[in-house]
């Protein structure tokens, strides 16, 4: 994601929070040296609590998008 920039000469790195998606791959990649660690975000809420709520919120948007795309087809 380009969230971590490493300066080899200065032996430092910078982390850009806006680009980080929280996948944790950087922690896995540096696991042997434990250079990085992740901590839970206390007030984080999952976007959807169940498959049902995903369907209830997502299907109307998908149908609306499909309708608009259908209307613009050549
Ligand atoms: S958590 Fe994922 S996106 Fe964020 S810095 Fe690590 S590898 Fe990059």
Image (cartoon, rainbow, N blue to C red):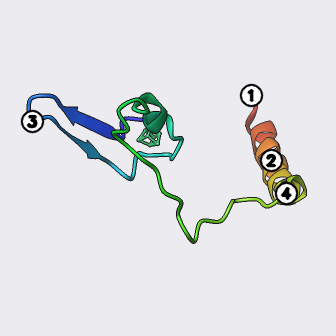
Bin the neighbour count of mark 1 within 10 Å (Cα to Cα): few under 14, some 14-19, many 20 and up. few
Q: Is the residue at mark 4 in contact range of ligand 1, meaning its CB lies under 8 Å from it?
A: no
State which tag comes first along the sequence, 3 or 1: 3
Residue occupying the far bottom of the picture: 43
- As measured in the structure, the alpha-carbon distance from the residue carrying label 2 to the one carrying label 1 is 20 Å
Relative placement, left or right, of 20 versus 35 is right
Can you tell which mark lies on residue 10?
3
- As measured in the structure, the alpha-carbon distance from the residue carrying label 2 to the one carrying label 3 is 48 Å
Element type at marker 1?
Answer: loop
The residue under the point 90% across, 56% down is 52
Q: Which residue is mark 1?
A: 74
State which tag comes first along the sequence, 4 or 3: 3
Q: Which residue is mark 2?
A: 62
- As measured in the structure, the alpha-carbon distance from the residue carrying label 3 to the one carrying label 1 is 56 Å
- As measured in the structure, the alpha-carbon distance from the residue carrying label 4 to the one carrying label 3 is 46 Å
CB contact under 8 Å: marks 4 and 2: no
State which tag comes first along the sequence, 2 or 3: 3
Element type at marker 3?
Answer: loop
Q: Nearer the viewer, residue 48 or 9?
A: 9
Relative placement, left or right, of 7 versus 16 is left
- As measured in the structure, the alpha-carbon distance from the residue carrying label 4 to the one carrying label 1 is 38 Å
Q: Which residue is mark 4?
A: 50
What is the number of callouts on the image?
4
- Residue 3: give x, y in percent of width and height: 36, 41
Element type at marker 2?
Answer: helix
């Amino acid at each position: 994601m380009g969230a971590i920039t490493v300066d080899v000469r200065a032996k430092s790195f910078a982390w850009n929070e806006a680009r980080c998606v929280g996948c944790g791959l950087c922690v896995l990649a540096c696991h042997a040296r434990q250079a990085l660690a992740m901590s839970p975000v206390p007030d984080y809420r999952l976007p959807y609590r169940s498959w049902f709520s995903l369907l209830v919120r997502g299907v109307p948007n998908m149908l609306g998008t499909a309708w608009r795309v259908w209307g613009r087809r050549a």
